[in-house]
Image: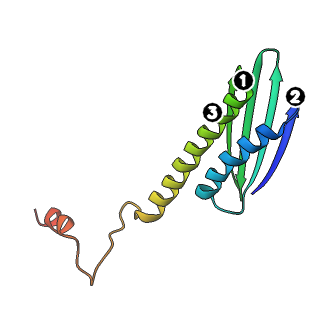
Amino acid sequence: MVIEYTGRQTVVTQKYKDLAEAGLKRIKKIVGAPATAHVVLTVDKYRKIAEVTVTQGSQSMVSNCESAEMSTALRDALAKLEQKAIRQKQKTSTIKRHPRAGEIPAEDGKLPDAVAAAEEG
């Protein structure tokens, strides 16, 4: 996974890079290999903001968190992004495995028992 770092009004230290790489490693397992990530760390007065964007193909997931500490904000943003990735993967697999409304999977031309019972009575 290709990772880009941007620091706005702050310096992206090795500590933050290691933290981001550990979180993105977990997300990579869910999303798949050909993905890119962009981590933006921003400081605004007393607020620390972490924004993480993961792009795979035409899909992109963004997570944005704010805290008093940068490491907390980054950890929360990565946790949110991981949950989004899990939801997206479950949604994709559910759509892929269920037939559309009106389509009945036929086995040797026979209707399933529930459908046959509904048609009889």
Instruction: For the residues labelled 1 and 3, say whether their Cβ atoms are less than 8 Å apart.
Output: no
Circle 1 SS class: loop
Q: Quadrant of residue 11?
A: top right
Q: Name the residue under label 2.
A: 10
Q: Which amino acid does label 1 sit on?
A: Glu
Q: Which amino acid does label 3 sit on?
A: Asp
Circle 2 SS class: loop
Q: Quadrant of residue 1?
A: bottom right
Which coloring applies here? rainbow
Marks 2 and 3, the one that precedes in the sequence: 2
Image x and y of residue 88, in percent: 55, 50
**Nearer to the camera, 56 or 38:** 38
Task: Specify the label residue 116 is tagged with.
Answer: none
Image x and y of residue 36, in percent: 76, 54
Q: Mark 1 points at which residue?
A: 69
Task: Specify the label residue 76 is tagged with.
Answer: 3
* Residue visible at 87% across and 30% down in the picture: 8
The image quadrant where one finds the C terminus is: bottom left
- How far apart marks 1 and 3 lie (CA) works out to 11 Å
Image x and y of residue 90, in percent: 49, 54
Marks 1 and 3, the one that precedes in the sequence: 1
Left or right, 39 with reference to 81: right
* Residue visible at 74% across and 35% down in the picture: 51
- How far apart marks 2 and 3 lie (CA) works out to 19 Å
- How far apart marks 1 and 2 lie (CA) works out to 13 Å
Instruction: For the residues labelled 2 and 3, say whether their Cβ atoms are less than 8 Å apart.
Output: no
* Residue visible at 80% across and 37% down in the picture: 40
Q: Which amino acid does label 2 sit on?
A: Thr
Circle 3 SS class: helix
